[in-house]
Image (cartoon, helix red, strand yellow):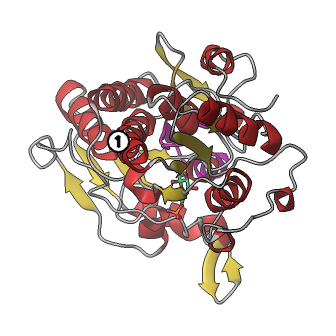
Amino acid sequence: MRLGILTGGGDAPGLNAVIRAVVRAAMRTHGWPAVLGIPEGFKGLVERLDPIELTPFTTRGLINRGGTILHTTNRANPFQYPVGEDRYADRSDEAIQRIEELGIDALVVLGGDGSLSIAHKLAAKGVRVMGTPKTIDNDIQGTELCFGHQTAVATATDALDRLHTTAESHHRIMVVELMGRYAGWIALRAGVAGAADAILIPETPFEPDRLCARIRDRAQQGATFSIIVVAEGAKPKGGDVSVLQPGEGVYQAQLGGIGHQVAGMLEGVTHLETRVTVLGHVQRGGGPVAQDRLLATHYGVAAVDALARGEHNSMVTFDGQRIGTIPLEQVAGGFRPVPQDHPLLESARQLGVILGE
Ligand code: F6P
């Protein structure tokens, strides 16, 4: 079987480790003749970019490398391809033609929900596809863990450790905004691991009064600083951010997202000096931690195994114990927030750091 492989959407640590595992399993174990790397995600198919011949030799030294050697873009949906300012066209037939022209029997797609939904639509038009779940946000339906997530959590936890020492030195409130889009996985995990005093996630809209009371309580108990973790998708109860009225001495609340809004409110109410860190793409950068290298390797091998068994139009999964697969139709368009009964959310509640229901 001749495989094609591409990386779609935003990057995440572990992409290169999956590529390496796919190439080795396909060529060494199954003796398949070629793995073609498609550059720039689906754009590489539509725009007929030159593929990269991947071999076990050319993919050495990749397990610990961040980013993606194939490059990626999140503006290249073949079904809604940008063809001008605010204009889109369905160019999926051209993408499929290119797959055929390159003699690709099956396409391995390393992507998040957007890329996996595209893969599912290509499958409906007859392309054999196999997905692997990639996103630091960890919000893909059907799997407990997406590769990249554990690295982002480790990076964010390290940032929280560093912010602790400077917060303590200056008696400040440090508000730290973490990625995760509409899900709170990164904020919850890093917040607990990094000993945050409050964790605001979209799944449990926070009560601003409780947040302020928590900071005041800490001050009364003698704590001279606080660390507040805010997921970028966090919202106050009721969803109206205008309740986060900035007070005097505001930390430029108007400039930023939810992290700045929370900081503005807190500084106004508590009169404690406040600073905001928006950790941003640092969470996506750099090489994968050991757990992500292992998960990525399992996923790459499992994707090839599944194709060898004749399976396609699926995504590889991890249920906490075993690697498996799930049909893409159960993944596409889905979303996996932190469930209300998740054990870590329950622990965080019991630590008193979740200030909403
Ligand atoms: O989905 C991954 C993610 O990093 C989100 O956490 C974040 O909201 C978004 O992508 C940022 O996207 P971009 O790289 O396009 O700014």
Which sits in the foreground, 183 or 247? 247
Within the image, what quadrant is residue 37 found in? bottom left
Quick check: 79 left or right of 312?
right
Query: Who's the residue at 61% across and 46% down the image?
Result: 230
Where 227 sits versus 193, above or below? below
Position of 96 compared to 7: left or right? right
Q: Quadrant of residue 350?
A: top right
Give the residue at x 86% y 57%: 243
The amino acid type, in three-letter code, at marker 1 is Thr
Residue name at image x 65 percent, y 38 percent:
215
From the viewer's perspective, tell me whether residue 95 is left or right of residue 34.
right
Q: Which residues are magenta?
A: 118-139
Q: Quadrant of ligand 1?
A: bottom right
- In magenta stretch: residue 23: no
- Residue 168: x, y in percent? 41, 42
* Image quadrant where one finds the N terminus: top left
Quadrant in which the C terminus appears: top right
SS type, badge 1: helix
Indicate the position of residue 180 as horizontal and vertical percent values. 58, 46
- Vertical comparison of 249 with 161: above or below: below
Count of all numbered marks drawn on residues in the image: 1
